[in-house]
Image (cartoon, rainbow, N blue to C red):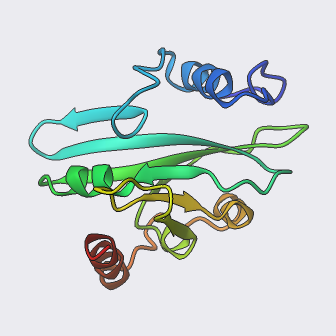
């Protein structure tokens, strides 16, 4: 468990904060700051291929964190049995909220994903961000089983069509 007085919790620079929290959570060093997709990539034999991106959220700020490059995400999800998740760590001044592990297809993630095309190069679909003001809702009313297959397919089709 991460202590509220952790030296990493309120670091202003994202990389030391993320690296420090990653070490506390996994007792490992970050694999690379230039990771292709996700901070933690694991294969579970032929069953699942997972990527998990750790997202820290300082609760008093309304920043919109970048979540993934659309082309890299589509490439990853094109593999059989691939699962992409977010591990949200909420940071408040006096405590660190319980971390939350959710699928990228959780209804709160889908509803609050912002597609950004103007940052993209000529041969890219763009990137996505999460609505920072709405991420707070994930820490209060999470239901990991709240995934709609229809909305997930609709979301993926919208990415492919970009």
**Residue found at x 37% / y 82%:** 151
The image quadrant that residue 94 belongs to is top right
Q: Quick one: quadrant of the C terminus? A: bottom left
- The spot of residue 108 in percent (x, y) is 55, 71
Side of 11 where 135 appears, left or right: left
Q: Position of residue 52 (x, y in %)?
A: 41, 42
Residue found 55% across the figure and 50% down from its top? 66
Decide: is 90 above or below 33.
Answer: below
Q: Is residue 100 above or below residue 110?
A: above
Where, quadrant-wise, is the N terminus in this rendering? Answer: top right
| Total marks in image | 0
Quadrant hosting residue 43: top left
Question: Is the residue 158 above or below the residue 54 in the image?
Answer: below
Image check: 6 left or right of 135? right
Could you say where residue 93 lies in the image, as x and y percent from the top left?
90, 38
Q: Residue 47 at x, y = what percent?
A: 14, 46
Q: Extreme right residue here? A: 94
């Amino acid at each position: 468990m991460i202590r509220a007085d952790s030296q990493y919790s309120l670091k202003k620079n994202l990389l030391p904060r993320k690296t420090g929290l990653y070490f506390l959570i996994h007792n490992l060093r970050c694999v690379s700051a230039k990771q292709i997709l996700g901070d933690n990539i694991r294969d579970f034999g032929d069953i699942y291929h997972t990527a998990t991106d750790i997202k820290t959220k300082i609760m008093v700020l309304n920043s919109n964190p970048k979540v993934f490059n659309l082309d890299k995400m589509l490439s990853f999800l094109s593999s059989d049995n691939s699962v992409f998740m977010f591990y949200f760590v909420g940071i408040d001044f006096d405590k660190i909220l319980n971390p939350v592990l959710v699928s990228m297809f959780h209804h709160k993630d889908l509803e609050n994903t912002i597609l950004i095309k103007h940052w993209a190069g000529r041969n890219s679909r763009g990137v996505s961000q999460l609505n920072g003001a709405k991420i707070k809702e994930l820490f209060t009313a999470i239901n990991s089983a709240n995934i709609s297959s229809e909305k997930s397919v609709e979301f993926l089709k919208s990415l492919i069509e970009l």
